[in-house]
């Protein structure tokens, strides 16, 4: 469902989100620019940008099967990883000059191993060791320092392989640029606080996805224009029954959002990778004497993180409760991929928390790319009707 | 059809099993109900935390995941616990052992600890249970310490982990009222060093052809030395007797009683809870002997350096990251995971390698091609099953047996 946005910039961003590659990438490469791919939000794009690279968040947009990847991954592995790796094997990411994988979950981590042995054009692949613990009293600085050291290694890897120098001023500029992105995205989210938001959740998702696929300077310009375009627009009055918050891993399938909109639900806020979690929580200190330390601190302590991080649950719940109030949320959707144990377990606890708080909660286990939507749609419809009946 | 074949043990091993039961009964875990009744402070921890510290502090502790194994699966209540967890609406594909542990926790069936100690390894399922331990209702207010283990295995990583572990001492002292004594800790660590050396020497004996002993003894030895009597002299003495008995069999070139060894293979994962329905049949039908499993495999564990508090913790971190079963293989690159399978196959003269493909081991599932290619290069038959090593309802042991039979036959091993 569309909000009726009349914005050339939006149309451009939606086009970028709808494809793996785009004209901005082609132009970047024509000018001799290098592109570095990454998977998880805890891989800091600030360092990539400071090296003069275009950071590209790998996604499985347009993928319809995983047959190539299934030689490397098992059906016990999550479909996000399999669709993305399938794209890689089909050459869709051949434009990448290097790939950075994090030691996040058991599934994504193995992309590093398989990338090394698969016949892929992109030969440079790096594994970034990210801490998997947060919130332990007295240990925060130890963990931040460790991650800072790992980030320094990643920086050196990029410097040595591409003959660039990633200096402190360059890092500060990159932090500033990414903070600006966060700020603009936050403003976009704030537009969704009103009764009839001028941009739908699916449209918002396209705007956010596009941001991880094009140069940040250009993206920030687009966001500025989009905010201007939306500032004078009244949202289309919709007869929705429930304002919803959606929680879980990245949602990169617009069809999934439409299931809510078609059934009378308005997703107004989220806690997803590359969604509100990226832009709503906090900013990286732009003036920090040691920018790498500031980036490490942001990623270890400030962001309400993926449930693969031990100790993240408390942080996540605080964020969800805060957003629920600010966005006048009627119900919560916990959505995660089949085979994702950290999110799955987290949803069990989230369910109990919402029950205590008297907030309607729906758990959806799904595949990365929606194919069988009938059952999902029925469950969503029943959930939204239940909320509507309570109001 | 009754597919269980009774396994007869020779007398010395019967005695060793009885003594192993005694070690368990005398362990902190074995006396847990007494501690609960008397109100003694207890520590709950993840199964990869080193027990030497608890032993030195005379601090009763238990591994949460071991509860899933012993209080659920070994007590015949595994399916009930797994199904009970599913009602919690948690992770549907979570390892069934972790499901059982989580169920016991969620239902408040575990002794309430005075402190919780966790590490961030080895797998996603462990993280899932860690989060329940630290956040879910029964234990939400219990003091906890969560230690971050690095994926890297360099010296800086060992120091990073060791530095955090040192902080568990004041934490435990404060939470439990127990006092730490460095001298006692050194004694326990030195005893532990003797045990791990014996574990390794015992493993070396098992290279013999024919295999002197069933693979299950590797896991039993591990449990005796790491879970029940870590750093205790009685554990060392028991391990020495196990070593001596096995050395004698090797000297006499004795294989497993009643088995004519024809096929040597490794089951490269945790031994299944339904082992009795599989391994004896394979022994009888094919003369196929399982030589090793993931917990029975003792990669050389670095000794604990007892020269100072710092050296103890740093060397312990080294032992933990490059020696601990599962942390070593799962919390590592596929090349380490597959490399261990290859080392076992070569060193133990295996004719075949079976990868059970336990449903909970997602990292292993993502490494199968890499490992398969390693064995293709070596020319050793390799087979992935895709079963559940704890909950036999996922794939009936009869089906597993049939699959392995077909694998042996098509590989020309029969």
Image: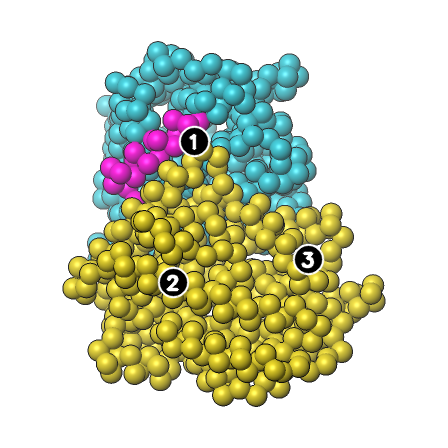
Chain colours: A yellow, B cyan
Q: Position of residue A324 (x, y in %)?
A: 67, 58
> What residue do we see at 47% from left, 64% from top?
A182
* Subunit bearing disc 3: A
Task: Check chain identity for marks 1 and 2: say if they share one.
Answer: no
Give the dominant element type of the magenta stretch: helix, strand or loop: helix
**Which-is-in-front pick, marks 1 and 2?**
2
- Examine the structure image and report whether residue B159 is included in the region drawn in magenta: yes
Q: CA distance from mark 1 to mark 3?
A: 40 Å
Quick one: label 3 or label 2, which is nearer the N terminus?
2
> What residue do we see at 23% from left, 23% from top?
B251
- Examine the structure image and report whether residue B89 is included in the region drawn in magenta: no
Q: Position of residue B134 (x, y in %)?
A: 57, 38
Do callouts 1 and 2 mark residues in contact (Cβ within 8 Å)?
A: no
How packed is label 1: few (under 14 Cα within 10 Å), some, or many (20 or more)? Answer: some
Mark yes or no: residue A93 visible.
yes
Q: In terms of depth relative to the viewer, which is nearer, A284 or B205?
A: A284
Q: What residue is disc 2 on? A: A176
Q: Position of residue A88 (x, y in %)?
A: 34, 72
Q: What residue is disc 1 on? A: B49
Q: Residue furthest front?
A: A287
Q: What residue is disc 3 on? A: A325
The tag on residue A357 is: none
> What residue do we see at 38% from left, 26% from top?
B166
Q: Position of residue A41 (x, y in %)?
A: 43, 60
Q: Which residues are magenta?
A: B151-168
User: B407 above or below A387?
Assistant: above
Q: CA distance from mark 3 to mark 2?
A: 29 Å
């Amino acid at each position: 469902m569309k909000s009726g946005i009349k914005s050339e910039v939006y149309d451009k961003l939606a086009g970028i989100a709808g494809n793996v590659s785009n004209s901005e990438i082609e132009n970047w490469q024509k000018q001799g620019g290098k592109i570095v791919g990454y998977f998880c939000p805890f891989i800091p794009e600030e360092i990539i940008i400071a090296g003069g690279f275009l950071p590209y968040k790998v996604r499985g947009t347009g993928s319809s099967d995983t047959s190539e990847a299934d030689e490397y991954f098992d059906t016990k592995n999550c479909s996000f990883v399999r669709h993305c790796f399938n794209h890689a094997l089909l050459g869709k990411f051949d434009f990448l000059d290097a790939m950075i994988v994090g030691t996040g979950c058991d599934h994504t981590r193995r992309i590093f191993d398989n990338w090394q042995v698969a016949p892929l054009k992109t030969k440079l692949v790096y594994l970034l060791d990210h801490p998997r613990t947060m919130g332990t009293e007295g240990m925060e600085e130890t963990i931040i320092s460790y991650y800072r050291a790992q980030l320094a290694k990643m920086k050196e890897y990029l410097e040595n392989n591409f003959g660039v120098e990633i200096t402190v001023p360059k890092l500060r500029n990159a932090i500033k640029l990414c903070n600006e992105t966060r700020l603009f995205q936050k403003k976009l989210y704030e537009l969704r606080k009103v009764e009839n938001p001028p941009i739908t959740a699916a449209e918002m998702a396209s705007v956010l996805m596009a941001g991880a696929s094009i140069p940040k300077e250009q993206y920030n310009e687009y966001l500025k224009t989009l905010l201007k375009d939306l500032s004078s627009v009244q949202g289309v009055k919709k007869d929705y029954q429930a304002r919803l918050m959606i929680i879980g891993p990245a949602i990169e399938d617009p069809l999934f959002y439409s299931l809510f909109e078609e059934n009378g639900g308005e997703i107004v806020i989220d806690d997803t990778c590359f969604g509100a979690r990226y832009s709503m929580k906090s900013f990286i200190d732009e003036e920090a004497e040691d920018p790498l330390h500031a980036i490490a601190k942001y990623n270890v302590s400030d962001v309400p993180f993926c449930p693969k991080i031990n100790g993240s649950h408390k942080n996540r719940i605080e964020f969800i409760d805060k957003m629920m109030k600010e966005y006048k949320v009627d119900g919560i959707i916990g959505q995660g991929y089949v085979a994702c144990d950290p999110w799955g377990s987290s949803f069990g606890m989230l369910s109990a928390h919402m029950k205590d708080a008297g907030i309607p909660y729906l758990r959806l286990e799904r595949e990365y790319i929606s194919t069988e939507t009938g059952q999902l749609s029925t469950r969503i419809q029943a959930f939204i009707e239940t909320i509507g009946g309570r109001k | 059809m009754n597919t269980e074949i009774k396994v007869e043990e020779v007398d010395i091993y019967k005695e060793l099993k009885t003594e192993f039961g005694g070690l368990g009964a005398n362990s902190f875990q074995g006396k847990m109900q007494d501690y609960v009744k008397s109100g003694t402070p207890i520590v709950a921890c993840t199964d990869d935390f080193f027990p030497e510290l608890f032993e030195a502090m005379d601090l009763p502790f238990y591994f949460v995941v071991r509860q899933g194994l012993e209080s659920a699966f070994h007590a015949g209540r595994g399916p009930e616990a797994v199904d009970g967890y599913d009602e919690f609406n948690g992770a549907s594909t979570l390892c069934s052992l972790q499901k059982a542990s989580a169920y016991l926790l969620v239902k408040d069936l575990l002794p309430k600890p005075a402190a919780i100690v966790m590490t961030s390894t080895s797998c996603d399922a462990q993280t899932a249970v860690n989060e329940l331990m630290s956040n879910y209702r029964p234990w939400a207010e219990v003091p906890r310490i969560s230690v971050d283990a690095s994926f890297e295995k360099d010296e800086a990583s060992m120091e990073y982990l060791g530095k955090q572990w040192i902080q568990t001492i004041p934490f435990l002292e404060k939470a439990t009222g127990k006092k730490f004594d460095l001298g006692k800790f050194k004694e326990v660590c030195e005893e532990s060093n003797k045990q791990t050396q014996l574990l390794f020497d015992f493993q070396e004996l098992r290279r013999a052809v024919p295999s002197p002993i069933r693979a299950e003894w590797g896991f039993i030895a591990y449990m005796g030395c790491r879970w029940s009597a870590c750093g205790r002299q009685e554990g060392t003495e028991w391990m020495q007797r196990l070593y001596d008995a096995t050395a004698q069999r090797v000297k006499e070139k004795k294989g497993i009683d009643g088995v004519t060894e024809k096929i040597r293979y490794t089951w490269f994962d945790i031994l299944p809870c339904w082992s009795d329905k599989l391994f004896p049949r394979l022994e009888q039908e094919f003369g196929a002997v399982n030589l090793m499993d993931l917990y029975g495999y003792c990669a050389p564990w670095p000794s604990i350096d007892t020269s100072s508090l710092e050296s103890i913790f740093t060397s312990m971190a080294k032992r933990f990251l490059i020696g601990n079963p599962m942390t070593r293989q799962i919390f590592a690159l596929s090349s380490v995971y597959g490399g261990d399978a290859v080392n076992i196959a070569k060193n133990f003269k295996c004719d075949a390698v079976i990868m059970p493909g336990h449903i909970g081991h997602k990292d292993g599932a993502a490494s199968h091609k890499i490992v398969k290619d390693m064995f293709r290069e070596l020319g050793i038959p390799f087979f992935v099953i895709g079963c559940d090593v704890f909950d036999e309802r996922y794939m009936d042991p009869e089906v597993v047996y049939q699959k392995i039979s077909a694998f042996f036959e098509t590989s020309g091993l029969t």
